[in-house]
Structure formats: structure tokens, C-alpha cells
Amino acid sequence: MTSPADPPDGAGTGGPRLRLLAVTACPTGIAHTYMAAEKLMQAAQALGHEMKVETQGSIGAENVLSDNDVIQADGIIVAADKDVDLSRFAGKRVLSVGVAEGIHHPERLIERVRSAPVHQGSGTGGGPGTAAPADGPAGGGGKQRGVGYKALMNGVSYMIPFVVVGGLLIAVSLALGGHAQPDGGLVIPEGSFWKHVNDIGVIGFTLMVPILSGYIAYAIGDRPALVPGMIGGWIANTGALYDSESGAGFIGAIVTGFLAGYLVVWIKKIEVPRFVRPIMPVIVIPVVATSALGLFFVYVIGKPIAWVFEHLTDWLGGLTGTSAALLGVILGLMIAFDMGGPVNKTAFLFGAGLVSKNPEIMGMCAAAIPVPPLGQGLATLLRRKMFSEQERETGLAALFMGFFGITEGAIPFAAARPARVIPANMVGGAVAGAVAGIAAVTDSVPHGGPIVAVLGAVGGVPMFFVAIAVGAAATALTTVTLMSTGSGTAGESTGASEPAAPSPSAPGAGEVLSGYLTGSTVRQRLVADEKEAAIREMAELLATTGKVTNADALVATALAREALGTTGLGEEIAIPHAKTDAVSAPVVGFARSAEGIEWGAPDGTRARLIFMIAVPEAAAGDVHLRILALLSRMLMDPGFRERLLAAPDTEAIMRVLGEIQ
């Protein structure tokens, strides 16, 4: 008797055609995703089978598999170097391998899928332990870094709406419903409409930290990790659970998110009796992981946190008699470090506790409090192309929140690029605190931002605004400087609008790929005989277009991308690429190497056909990525490659490249 998961008898041997599905995906770049899809399609056609391939590239999922496709399928091939949701394939034969296997051994995969294990649906994603093991090479390189970055960005993307909604509702309720008190401060009357609006905003702010933690965990361990991630984030943010004046904030949430995700991955690997497997993802794993993580944080991590910040408060108390500028620098650094986290709250509570005795201390804190959101918002205005559309919108919200002294408005930027944004925030916070300290600015209410000066709680208003302005400018300039000089591998968020480009189906004279590649960016023969020299030579070629503002930075970014995993794709092809603001507009170059260059390709071939692609960080939009997909697919045609190698001159090369439609 044949099970529903079995292919028809005789399939692949001259009998009925197999109905096959495939999913291809890679965590960095896009070329592997589409090349694997094209190879699988070609192999299936040659063997007489039907195949539909879903590609999960940088532009999102395309050619998505429907429920009907899955029901009718005889087998599914998942050629991916990142997590792919396998829950929809329960009851079907699933073969899971690295994306390079799909490129180099598609016929073998089609043969193997006939005897692949049936996916049981225990676990709902492509996390470890949920898919059939891949015996081929992983092929993507840099997988762990890719998974960690993807997980962090997943948490940030879900957190942003909570930050924006919570912060704006609190700010609006304070502005429209708050009443200034004789002793300072804003109070919203209990039971009023604006008090209810404020309460809703507070709920949004309260939820943002566990949301960040939960969706980091979800990206690593799938659905079973969501509960321990969220509860772990709530515990991290609730200092009362481990005798701390304040919680661990968003930094604690990042820690609990990764701990929860990898704890769940580890638990999934434990062999359990068959009768226990159905309840593992819905009962056993969430309960065990949540309990273990929560107790670990309360008893192991939480106690040291409470001890550190208790003694930090005492240490600050001993600084009140020292230089005002030095104290302002220290308080500014602390306020800006974790934006509402324990370090921030320690400095804030220190200032608030002395507000009636020494209002200059609170004045330093009040000047530093709005600097991170104001600085990051200003950065999105100064260098718009460095930021995605979503980040620019978040920047406007951050400016609004900064005016009302809501430091958390900068958290989305810090969570996405901690190594660049946190130091920039601290620079601005230190400058603002120092200026306020030197000018003896006072604040009679336990709050910060321009709003307290507008409401009359600040003494020395002109210098208060100077301190904020100078601090915000320092943060903005430091942020764009660090982003400009970085390797381009952090903050990989895309989505910024790209200028309209000509249709790739109608290249103009002397240009192809929507005009990104022209005759001036074609080199018939490279002088270089090794990879780094070839990348440098091609960067210099692209620089002749005037679109490269810093060739050395372009080379550094391209080499950093190579460190994540080779861009040598096999079949004598390499596609080095870089996303960096060392270029002002997308540009593509092509060159040939007569002897070939060792590029670390999975199939061992030396690269003879080399395309180099460079785009600004904020300009890698859908149009550009679709052109890259077309290029990757076309290169899988042996005849196309032969024509490129045989073309006698630049004009002939351009005619061959013009076949890309």
C-alpha cells in the first residue's frame, strides 16, 4: 500500500511525472537563492517532472507555494541556508539541504527526495531539529552571524510600533492633558480622558521590551520560543522581581531573547519517547524553557544587576562635591547608554532624589534625556539615504518624543545598530550633561527634555537649550560618521525608496540591467590574478562612472561581505557585491579573467565571469534586486556563459548581456 506521502510508482523512471515543490533561500545576498531555483527547475524539466519553486530572497517570498500545491506534491526540496517554515509541509516527504546543493546537484536532490523522511510537523519552523539533515555542504558561509542578525532585526521590527505608539500617546497626553504643579512637574488628573490616553501609551511602552525579547527568540527557536522569550523579557524589565530599583531594559531583553531562542533549540535536540513528541512544542518546551530562563534571570543574573546598580547609586552620591562638568559627563553617559534601562534609571533616580536639595543634578540629567532621540532623528534628516523609509519615519517620531523627554524613542536605532548608535548617543549625552553642569542649569521636576523648560521648571533656559542642541548635534554627527566609515554589514535594513529606473526589458544603447551596467564598466580582461586584487581593480573600474565616492571604502565593504561567505557561485562565476554609502547610486561592472581567479567556489572552479555590484545602503530597492535575480538566473544558462566568454570586444559583450530580459 502506498502512503499519501509516496510518489507514484515508476516516477522518474519513465513512469508518471513527479509533482515537486522547492523552496530556495540564503541569508546573505540574493544570487544563490535564484541560481538554486533556476537549476532545480532546469533539472526537473530535463528529467520530465513538474516543479514549482518558491524563492525567499531579499525582496521577500516570490512564487509562493499554495495549500493546493502542497496537497498535490509528491515531495518538497528545501535548499536554504536560513530558517524556512516547514509546518505547512507536514505529512509530505521533505529533503532539507544547503542552498549550494540546489545549485550544484539538482538532479541528485530530485532523486533523493523520493526517499526523504516524511515531515511530522513536530515543531513549526526550520529551526534545528525540525528538518531532515543536510548531508551536502551548507554553502552559504556566515550562517551563524546571519541567524543572529536576522533574529535581532526580527525583534526590532516588531518592537518599533510599540515604541512609536506608546511614546507618542504619552507625549500627546502630557502636552494636552497635563497640568503644571506649583512644585514642578506635570500631572494628568485621574479619571480624565487624557489620563486614559496616557495609560494606553504606558501599556505600549511596557510591552515593547518583552516584544523585542520574544521575537528575537521566535526567529531562533520558532513558536515554542515565543513564550519564554516574552516572559523572559518581562522579567528582565521588572526589577522588583530581583530586588533592583529598575529593570534591565532593552539590553536585558536582547540577552533573554537569545537565551530563550537557543535554549529552545537545545531542548528540541533531546530525544524523547514518541508519545511525548506531539506535546513538546505546545507544552513541554515552553514550560521548561520559560521556567528555566525565568529562574536563571531572577536568581543568577538579576541579583548581580541589583547589587551593581545599588553601589553605582552610592558612587554617584560621592561625586556631588566634585567638578560639575565631570558629574555632568558621567550622568549624560549613563542617561544615554541604555535609554530607559538600569543604567539610565540609576542616573535618573539619583537626580530625581536630589531634585529638592540640588536641582543642578537634575538639570544635567534633564539636558541629556532628550539627546538620544533628538540626535537619531536629526541623523535621519541629515543623511536620509543612509536610512530606510521605516527608519526615517521612526526618526520623525523620535524627534517628537525627544521634545517630551522620552529617551526610549532612540531604542529602535540602538537595537538595530548598537555598536554605532549607543556610542553616538553617549557622546551627545556627555556633551549635554557637561554643558548643563558648567552653566549651572537647574530643573525642579523629575523629568527632562525641552517640555520642562516650556512649562517653566528650568532655571537657565537659554543654556539648557544650548546643551540639548549641542548634544543632539554631536549624537547626529557621530552616528552618520560611524555609519559612513563602517563596513556596511550592520544595520542592513532596506526598504528605502529607489529612484525610478528604466525597465530592464528595454535597455538603452550601450547599457543593460536598467542602465546600471554600461560599456564603460566592462573590462574584457582583468590584470589581477587573485580575489582581493580583482575586487580592487573592479572597484576602480566602477569609480570611472563618478558614482563611487570612496573606492577604498567600497573595496573594504566588498571584502567584508566575502568574509561572511564567498560570492564565488561556481560555474566559473563570481558576483562580489557591496552595500555602502561609498557609492552615490547603484552601479554594476563586468570583467573576464582568462586564466580564472580562485574565489572559493563550492564546485572548485576558478572565476572567469565576474560581476561587481555596488549600491548605496538605502538604495537597494526591489527594482535593483529583481535585476540581480534576472542576472543570476541567466548565468545558469551554459550557452549564455559561453557567449560571454567568446565575445571578442566590449560591443559584443554588451550585446550578449542585452539578452537579459
Image: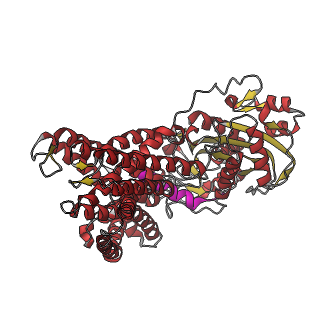
Residue at 65%, 38% in the rendered image: 628
Q: Which residues fall within the magenta stretch?
A: 139-156
- Viewer-proximal residue among 205 and 189: 189
Give the residue drawn at x 61%, y 54%.
Answer: 114
- Please say whether residue 214 is visible from this viewpoint: no
Left-right relation of 432 to 126: left
Asked whether residue 542 is drawn in magenta, I would say: no
Horizontal relation, residue 310 to residue 547: left or right: left
Image position, residue 216 (x, y; %) = 42, 57
Q: Is residue 443 left or right of residue 619?
A: left
Question: For residue 520, which quarter of the picture?
Answer: top right
- Is the C terminus in the top left, top right, bottom left or bottom right quadrant? top right
Q: Is residue 502 above or below residue 278?
A: above
Task: Report the label total.
Answer: 0
Residue 346 position, x and y percent, is: 30, 65
Q: Residue at x 69, y 39 (%)?
A: 548
Relative to the observer, which residue lies in front, 423 or 392?
Answer: 423
Q: Position of residue 83 (x, y in %)?
A: 52, 55
Above or below, 476 against 503 in this view is below
The prevailing secondary structure element of the residues shown in magenta is helix
* Residue 87: percent from left, percent from top: 45, 53
- Image point (40%, 55%), residue name: 429
